[in-house]
Amino acid sequence: MNRGRRGENIFSDKTDFEIFLGILQESSELFGCRVAAFCLMSNHYHLLLQTPLGNLSRVMRHVNGLYTQRYNRRQKVDGQLFRGRYKSLLVEEDSHLVELLRYIHRNPVRAHICKSVSDYRWSSHHVYVSTAKKWDWLYTDFLLKMFSETLDKAITEYEKFVQREESEEIIDFFKKKNFPSILGSRNFVELVKAKYYRKKKHDEVPQSKDLAPTIIEIKKVVGLCYKIDIKELEEVTRGQEKEPRNVAIYLARKHSGLSLAEIGKEFGCIKYSTVSNVVRRIENKLAENNQLSKMITLIRGKLSLEHRKNCPLFAPFSKRETL
């Protein structure tokens, strides 16, 4: 979520709203993030995202930066549009997630802009009750399945749910001046702290292994992007540097959740120290090689799409396929 500087508007007219949504769609495709919900208000916005590639900062930098440029160009102004860096929180995938979905969609009702969520145009509520193809880029199935495995019933139950007022728990949570960075049960909060707080040296931590791409998926997408056979990624050629192979090793280390030794076995039984050196070389090159950076960004986007096809967590409603 983010707000305009000094509470000023960040959306001035219909075109501004449409431009922001266009950038959001572009970002989801470019960076492999999954936009599950949104609500755009005149001076702030709320987004519900999944970032299986652990690249939230990169996504939001693109969204806020590009929108600011286009807004300033249209309005013939200059300078900062938002009050600062976006605010984010980690949400547990249980009742807290659907509570947050309702909180986001009821934002205009709480602000007394409208009487019903269906009266407000610039939120994803309409997407949750629609099967229009233009919204296929939004990841609504994941949350709708929490209401029912059958699409029609899921939509009906969702509509009933969102028309009811938010729980006191979620209202109290956001009333806090500096609300916590984690929304979930006590057990979930303790789990996150125990598992990830010791890894603060990392800016972001990818989601669980259920959302992480497999080695096979990584090799397949790298091979397609570099137009080479997967076997070439697995061959060890002494004295030669192979960019596609190194990129595959780098992405495996960043996203597969496997150890250095496990990755080494997947790439010709190389030593774990070799894997570490390859990752470090790619990281160094990324700082100065724009073409390499673009290639890895492209691969990550395609990798997310490939994983989504294979991951049962994101299987579409069987009924939706016939609509």
Image (tube, helix red, strand yellow):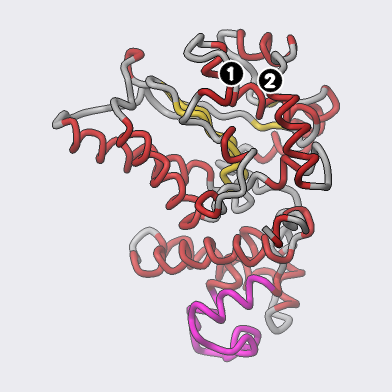
**Label 1 neighbour load within 10 Å: few <14, some 14-19, many 20+:** some
Regarding residue 58, the answer to whether it shows in the image is no
Assign a secondary structure to mark 1: loop
Amino acid at the residue labelled 1: Ser
- Specify the amino acid type for callout 2: Gln
Q: Name the residue tied to disc 2.
A: 163
User: In the picture provided, is 281 more to the left or to the right than 309?
Assistant: left
Q: Is residue 46 above or below residue 310?
A: above
Label 1 belongs to which residue? 116
Q: Taking 54 as reference, is 195 left or right?
A: right
Q: How far apart in space, not on screen, are marks 2 and 1 (Cα)?
A: 7 Å
Quadrant for residue 248, please give it. Answer: bottom right
Q: Are marks 2 and 1 in contact (CB under 8 Å)?
A: yes
Measuring 51% from the left and 26% from the top, which residue is drawn there? 87
Q: Nearer the viewer, residue 111 or 226?
A: 111
With respect to residue 282, does 36 lie above or below? above
Q: Looking at the picture, how far across and down is residue 239, in whole percent?
A: 51, 89
Q: Quadrant of the C terminus?
A: bottom right
* Residue for point 43% across, 23% down: 41
Task: Determine the residue positioned at 70% across, 84% down.
Answer: 268
Residue lying furthest left:
76
In the displayed structure image, the side of residue 252 where residue 120 appears, left or right: left
Q: Position of residue 162 (x, y in %)?
A: 69, 24
Residue 35 in view here = yes
Residue visible at 59% across and 65% down in the picture: 303
Residue 107 drawn in magenta:
no
Q: SS for tag 2?
A: helix
Main secondary structure of the magenta stretch: helix
Q: Earlier in the sequence, mark 2 or mark 1?
A: 1
Residue 199 numbered tag: none
- Magenta-drawn segment: 217-246
